[in-house]
Image (cartoon, rainbow, N blue to C red):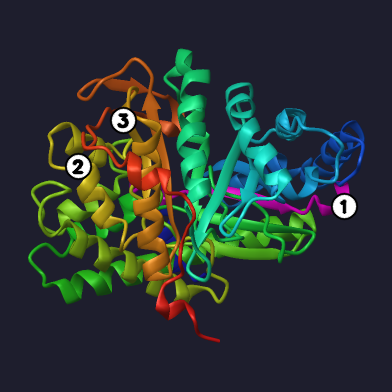
Amino acid sequence: MNQREVIETMKMIQEEKLDIRTITMGISLRDCADENPERACAKIRDKIGRLAGRLAAVGEEIEDTYGVPIINRRIAVTPISLVAESSRTDDYVPFARALEDAARDAGVNFIGGFSALVHKGATPGDRKLMQALPRALSETERVCASVNVATTRSGINMDSVRTMGKIIKAIAVASKDRGSVGCAKLVVFANAPEDNPFMAGAFHGVGETEAVINVGISGPGVIKSALEKIQGSDLEAVAETIKRTSFKITRVGQLVAREAARRLAVPFGIVDVSLAPTPSVGDSVAHILEEMGLERCGAPGSTAALMLLNDAVKKGGLMASSFVGGLSGAFIPVSEDLGMIEAAREGALTIEKLEAMTAVCSVGLDMIAVPGDTSEDTIAAIIADEAAIGVANNKTTAVRIIPVIGKKAGDFVEFGGLLGSAPIMPVNRFSPSDFIARGGRVPAPLHSYRN
């Protein structure tokens, strides 16, 4: 970086809330499989401790050296359904506890990978992991989980979608004394990426190396500040401004990622150039869309504005780094974005409008709080709808939905920290039960048959 870029970066950090949202170390646990579950769990704790023991300290060192805030240090591991399947046990909760212990000892706030890949079918290990989710997520604080139920190449596994509807309700009940927060640590994916540094959906893919450093950047406040300087300009100027700003943000992210990888003696993987909002004032993706000219996020035009934002962020990131991956684009989690919370409370933003917007953004229906009496079949159908968008458009989509036990539409729930707070959003009252009960698989779309 030259002197001018350093000054610009410091301004973005000090005034516009630029930060590195997470340094995530991916760790392969494939060599920890053992027929004895106690030995397998011991191997997991030992390996994570050996490789990630300095992760938190290195993050602090980089903050001190470069002055770039690093909000989270996290770990992602091989999907546990693959590791635990060799063990002679029907109970996978001890594996979640082993991950919890390892994360606590390493000083990280989340560990992802209590996961299963069931987009074409489920093995006995996959089913055991899914059945363990209610206890695993309610009895731990740091463990995050994900289940991939669909891909463009295989279609949608509706049997697993129906199962996840039931499991999400069970998690909500198991953690009801804390606002059903266990559901906030579970993502149901279509086309899950294997190098995603963001929780709750992070896991270390089977095609990854032994260990790797992936970095997720942020910066909604920086983008909004840049757009404030070009008020009245046309949308081509808006796109160009976002692209140039994303380039600068990504350069900072790559600097931090390479430095962390060097100090930890593991390979640098990718920079995820997603705009990840927080509940703080001035750090909202929704407010970027409103800066483009929308009265409120969710108004007509929101999907077009989000498409422009997402595309420009990716273009800028790709110009800044040859190793852009993960999800990359713009997140629209309701509870974690102050502007989204405001729009939902005022009725400008509905679940249906959010679903339309997910066709052009990075993930999907993220951190959506719904009434606690929402049926299992309705939750499953919402997952199926979102998976269909991902499968048809050959993109990652996901659902992180929270049926808050004891709450009704119009109420409010507080999760705390980066998880924020959320209005309870109403859901369509008509039933999809007969459709969900059919089960089977939704076939892959025609455009998936290419080689």
- Determine the residue positioned at 87% across, 34% down: 37
Which element is circle 2 on? loop
Quick one: 160 or 294, which is closer to the camera?
160
Asked if the stretch drawn in magenta spans residue 51, the answer is no
| Residue bounds of the magenta highlight | 13-32
- Determine the residue positioned at 18% across, 39% down: 343
Q: Which mark is residue 388?
A: none
Q: Earlier in the sequence, mark 3 or mark 2?
A: 2
Which element is circle 1 on? helix
Q: Tell me the kind of residue under disc 2.
A: Thr
Q: Which mark is residue 350?
A: 2
Which element is circle 3 on? strand
* Residue 200 shown left or right of residue 299 in the figure: right
Quick one: 447 or 366, which is closer to the camera?
447
Q: Which mark is residue 31?
A: 1
Q: Which mark is residue 370?
A: 3
Using the image, determine if residue 210 lies above or below residue 135: below
